[in-house]
Amino acid sequence: MKREIEALLFAADGPLTVARLKKLLVGADAAGIKEAIAELESEYTQAGHAFTVVEFGGGWQIATRPEFSPSVEKMLKSRRFTRLSKAGLEVLAIIAYRQPITRLEIDEIRGVNSSGAISTLTERNLITVVGRSQAIGNPLLYGTTREFLNHLGLKGLGQLPALPELEDVMQDREQLRDFANQIGREISAQELEEYFEAPVTGPEAGSAEEVPEDHPAEPAPEQDAGHEDNAQP
């Protein structure tokens, strides 16, 4: 079973959970699966391989060891997962640390309309609708996805690095750069200057370029009333 698990982890494009492995391996139980994975990890370590089994996003995957990440990043630099604008980074940070949260609450923190950034993050599967608020109008609540955890290599939201105040991060070049690096977005000094020197010209400033005209970010409650099932994570 250990070699079967090794083959599955190697071929998977994302972490495999115990539940998924049990379905793929007839007769396997959770204890046996975890034991086999631990043995694989031990084998890789003893043999000095450049890869190992890592646990994140609720499951396991074979991945390169951290000490080799600089070399791998150079090779994959042109294939970065995502290129987010300042607005996208701001909104993603706010949702990650304040979820579940409504668009209006995000707008209050940023001071501008966030519909465009929310639409972009949703399309890239970094955030999703997790329910509805009990406030007037029952606005949609947003939260991060498993893909967000996978990309950061986290087992859960409890592993997110501590931040002082989100409002401070939005105004601090280095803190914004650090958060961007965590999600695979390298920001140059010139980009930071452009971000912070760009004038706010309207309610959609900083996010309007991200909004596809045929992809509304948040449907009105009456339009979405018949799709409550789709609002679940």
Image (cartoon, helix red, strand yellow):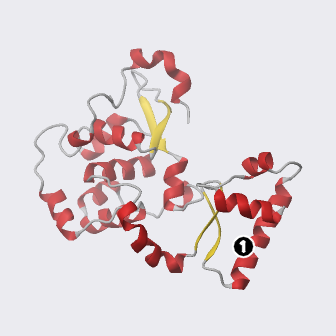
Query: Can the viewer see residue 100 in this picture?
Result: no
Residue 10 percent across, percent down from the top left: 66, 62
Residue 182 percent across, percent down from the top left: 42, 64
Q: Left or right: where does residue 195 sit relative to residue 59? A: left
Residue 90 percent across, percent down from the top left: 31, 51
Q: Is residue 214 above or below residue 72?
A: above
* Amino acid type indicated by mark 1: Glu
- Indicate the quadrant where residue 79 lies: bottom left
Query: Can the viewer see residue 171 in this picture?
Result: yes
Q: Quadrant of the N terminus?
A: bottom right
Which residue appears at 33% of the width and 55% of the height?
Answer: 83
- Tally of marks: 1
* Near-viewer residue (49 or 149): 49
Q: Alpha-carbon neighbours of circle 1 within 10 Å: few (<14), some, or many (≥20)?
A: some
Which residue appears at 56% of the width and 36% of the height?
Answer: 233
Which residue ends up furthest to the right in the rendered image? 27
Q: Is residue 103 above or below residue 95?
A: above
Which residue appears at 37% of the width and 67% of the height?
Answer: 77
Which residue appears at 39% of the width and 21% of the height?
Answer: 137
Residue 33 percent across, percent down from the top left: 81, 59
- Indicate the quadrant where residue 38 lies: bottom right
Q: Left or right: where does residue 109 sit relative to residue 34? A: left
* Near-viewer residue (152 or 73): 73
Can you identify the residue that label 1 sits on?
Answer: 41
Q: Left or right: where does residue 174 sit relative to residue 157? A: left
Q: Left or right: where does residue 70 sit relative to residue 8? A: left
Secondary element at tag 1: helix
